[in-house]
Amino acid sequence: MVLDSKKSAQLNFDDQEIDLPIFSPNLGPDVVDIRKLYAQGDVFTYDPGFTSTASCESAITFIDGDKGELLYRGYPIDQLAEKSHFLEVCYLLLYGELPTAAQLDEFVPRVTRHTMLHEQMAYFYRGFRRDAHPMSIICGVQGAMSSFYHDSTDINDPWQREVASIRMIAKMPTVAAWAYKYSIGQPFIYPRNDLDYASNFLHMCFAVPAEEYNVDPIVSRAMDRIFTLHADHEQNASTSTVRLAGSSGANPFACIAAGIACLWGPAHGGANEAALNMLREIGTVDRIPEYIARAKDKDDPFRLMGFGHRVYKNFDPRAKVMKESADEVLGLLGIEDNPTLQVAMELERIALSDPYFIERKLYPNVDFYSGIILDAIGFPTSMFTPIFALARTVGWIAQWKEMIADPTQKIGRPRQLYTGAKHRNYTDVENR
């Protein structure tokens, strides 16, 4: 969709006046079009981190950080988390509309019947050290998919793009679960087509051949909500990485592997792991006042992890939904013998009642609650980011497909503010 410009801005410098079109999106602030700035004025813009730059036109996800609003294709995240399920949300992100009953009945089996991995990929896992981090494993395995499924790597073929999309959504739970099983030395558990998406993932993670494992529906529902709440989040670092890799024409498996690599960074995908590590550092409820005092001390480098959010200046809309699931899971599994979860619950109570946190809007965010849930279920912290990657895969794919179909997209090529040496002549080594 090409936006019409109904107004413009004038930039004046060095006796030049450049007219810059202004576009008005359906939601969000107006956007100044600077694409011709270099050609007409021989200048660039400077925006480290691209925090004030729209890199693309997108119709998938919208965030209003001031209002605490997150929309998938226009639908509020709390409605989707309450009334929908992850595969229905996948359909919405991929195709733009909620599916009819018939469309959902066709889509869910398509995903379910692609959950198995090529059998030779089991040998690929065994090439990693046993103590390899699960994120390094899933990043490598995801990238290797282009070798095992090379019949769906032609980005110019719409059908191959569709097949690759379904394959990645279907196989990522198996990829992540097998990374977990490999890291703990247990045999791989194959996917089961009689289980829903979240239950199948939990079964592959926690079942063993020696005995029956039944997935509790409360735990499965919490897992499904974690997937839904993390499915997409606009043009974040990993999504932008996927789009940038895709702009070069790279195959879809490689693009998603690039997104996984970016997500591995602790400033991005490791937030829930950092939050749980903080709770463990605090250790017991009686030590909370000490850490609250440190958090309030501006001269102390300590920061409470899992509170507040860079984008959401009011509250994280995903956190409200995640809190409900956390309460349900902890009610089922109990926290009496888990000091970490006891610390989490007391810290949550303080943060929601202490004026210091309320005035600064440092509410518990989605990473705080998802970390609590995953820990209660039994996942080690090393699996938190792989689970994030599993959930985000559909968002990455939807963004990648949108980029491929955009007639205005070009290979990504950010510019720079050069501060290095000016022109210098080469000096022979004996004269240096």
Image (cartoon, rainbow, N blue to C red):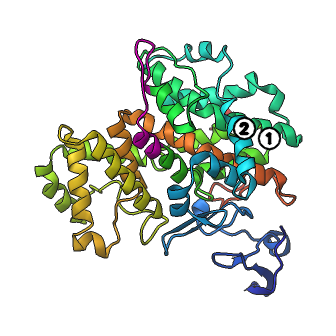
Q: Quadrant of residue 45?
A: bottom right
Amino acid marked by disc 2: Ile
Side of 216 where 81 appears, left or right: right
Q: Position of residue 262 (x, y in %)?
A: 57, 43
| Mark 2 → mark 1, Cα distance in angstroms | 6 Å
Q: Position of residue 339 (x, y in %)?
A: 19, 41
Query: Mark 1 = which residue?
Result: 162
Looking at the rendered structure, the secondary structure element under dot 2 is helix
Examine the rendered structure and indicate whether residue 286 appears above or below residue 43: above
Residue 208 counted in the magenta span: yes
The answer to whether residue 431 is seen in the rendering is: no
Give residue 207's position: percent from left, percent from top.
44, 22
Crowd band around label 1 with a 10 angstrom C-alpha radius: few (<14), some (14–19), many (20+):
some
Magenta stretch in the rendered image: 206-223
Quadrant where the C terminus sits is top right
Give whichever of 399, 79 is nearer the camera. Answer: 79
Residue at 68% x, 79% y: name it: 30
Q: Are marks 2 and 1 in contact (CB under 8 Å)?
A: yes
Q: Viewed as shown, does residue 210 lie left or right of 243?
A: left
Residue at point 43% right, 32% down?
215
How crowded pointer 2 is (Cα within 10 Å; few <14, some 14-19, many 20+) is rated as many
**Which residue occupies 41% across, 54% down?**
322
Query: Quadrant of the image for the N terminus?
Result: bottom right
Q: Residue furthest left?
A: 286
For image coordinates 56% across by 58% down, the residue present is 80
Figure check: 314 above or below 387: below
Residue 166 numbered mark, or none? 2
Relative depth, front residue between 97 and 413: 97
> Is residue 228 among what the camera can see?
yes
> Is residue 350 located in the magenta-colored stretch of the structure?
no
